[in-house]
Image (cartoon, grey):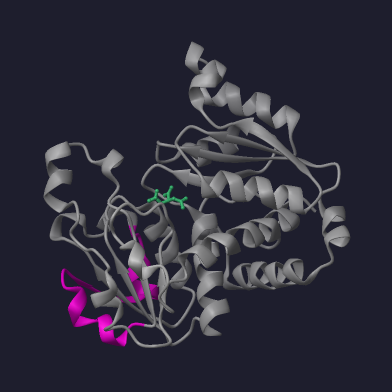
Amino acid sequence: MKNFSQNDIISIRDLSKDNLEEIYSKTNEIIEMKAEERREIARGKTLGYLFFEPSTRTRLSFQSAMALLGGTSFGIADATSSSVQKGESLADTVRIMSGYTDAIVLRHSLDGSSKFAAEVSSKPIINAGSGTEEHPTQAIQDLYTIKKELGKIDGKNIGIVGDLKYGRTVYSLLYGLSNYDVNVHLISPESLKIRSDSTYNLKENLSYTESENLDEYIEDLDVLYVTRIQKERFPDEEEYVKVKGSYVIGQDVVNKMKDDSILLHPLPRIDEISTDVDSSKQAKYFQQAEYGKFTRAAILSLLLQ
Ligand code: NCD
């Protein structure tokens, strides 16, 4: 992508390394700015959100980012309160929203939903989660967190554990990481390994190992990125029950981690990280969520210019 202005963000693959670096710099710039300066950035602009799946952080961080920039946001947080409930199509809903706003953030359970919305929308679409496919703004926030907390991304050992099959944040993160020189260790139960049909040319650009055993890598990791088992995406509840609770990061696991390593999670967590770990030095997931407000403000400011 040459520049962000008025462009859709559907996949993190649309963004070059320069684009990513531009977002990190813009994020730092926004954090440093005076509040009244920030409020000029999107003054008079509106962001529409269409969330057809539950969300806490993504929607609220987009809303708080827009407020930070002096703009307004409104939308649908629950499909049952919109005319979708009466049978209105996604295409019509997006078309209507694009007439009311300057950009649209969309979350939907179907793969391809954001790409489809971008085809019918007259305003830029930001993918806030499309089925099991991607969640690019989460990955941008994850990459920013690594850079901010560890100083750089290059050269780091990154473990990603949990539901690698259905977790859309994983695919966006892997594609984002493929811009850097990193060692990635993918750790999951056999049945939740990454989908080879969704990793296209990833192998050419990223070196990664696949294993079921976190213990093999834990002592060498700079980053441990934990994901939730995506219960709602399993075609069969029995299959979920088999892998539920496969990896639980407790203080015993954190004790094996390097002193200056970080523990991340896109959240929500269910039982993958015990709450007693929250006060450990490595636990950065709440900080990561807060960075999401600023990285999204950076994305919006670049997109709406
Ligand atoms: C993620 C998602 O929706 O994919 N949530 C988020 O946006 N932070 C992760 C998840 O639901 O497990």
Write down the quadrant of residue 276 in the picture.
bottom left
Asked if the stretch drawn in magenta spans residue 266, the answer is: no
> On the picture, is 31 further left or further right than 129?
right
Residue 243 on image: x %, y %: 16, 53
Relative to 5, is 157 above or below?
below
Front-most of residues 266 and 19: 266
Count of numbered marks: 0
Residue 41 on image: x %, y %: 83, 55
Q: In the image, what residue occupies the spot 59% across and 21% down?
A: 92
Q: In the image, what residue occupies the spot 55% across and 16% down?
A: 83
Front-most of residues 131 and 15: 131
> On the picture, is 31 further left or further right than 132?
right
Asked if the stretch drawn in magenta spans residue 207, the answer is: yes
Relative to 254, is 38 above or below?
above
Residue 8: in sight, yes or no?
no
List the single residue furthest toward the top.
86
Image quadrant where one finds the N terminus: bottom right
Residue 145 on image: x %, y %: 53, 71
Looking at the rendering, the stretch of residues picked out in magenta corresponds to 199-221
Q: In the image, what residue occupies the spot 70% across and 72% down?
A: 28
Relative to 92, is 268 above or below?
below
Residue 9 on image: x %, y %: 59, 51
Front-most of residues 179 and 130: 130
Q: In the image, what residue occupies the spot 27% across and 54% down?
A: 165
Residue 11: in sight, yes or no?
yes
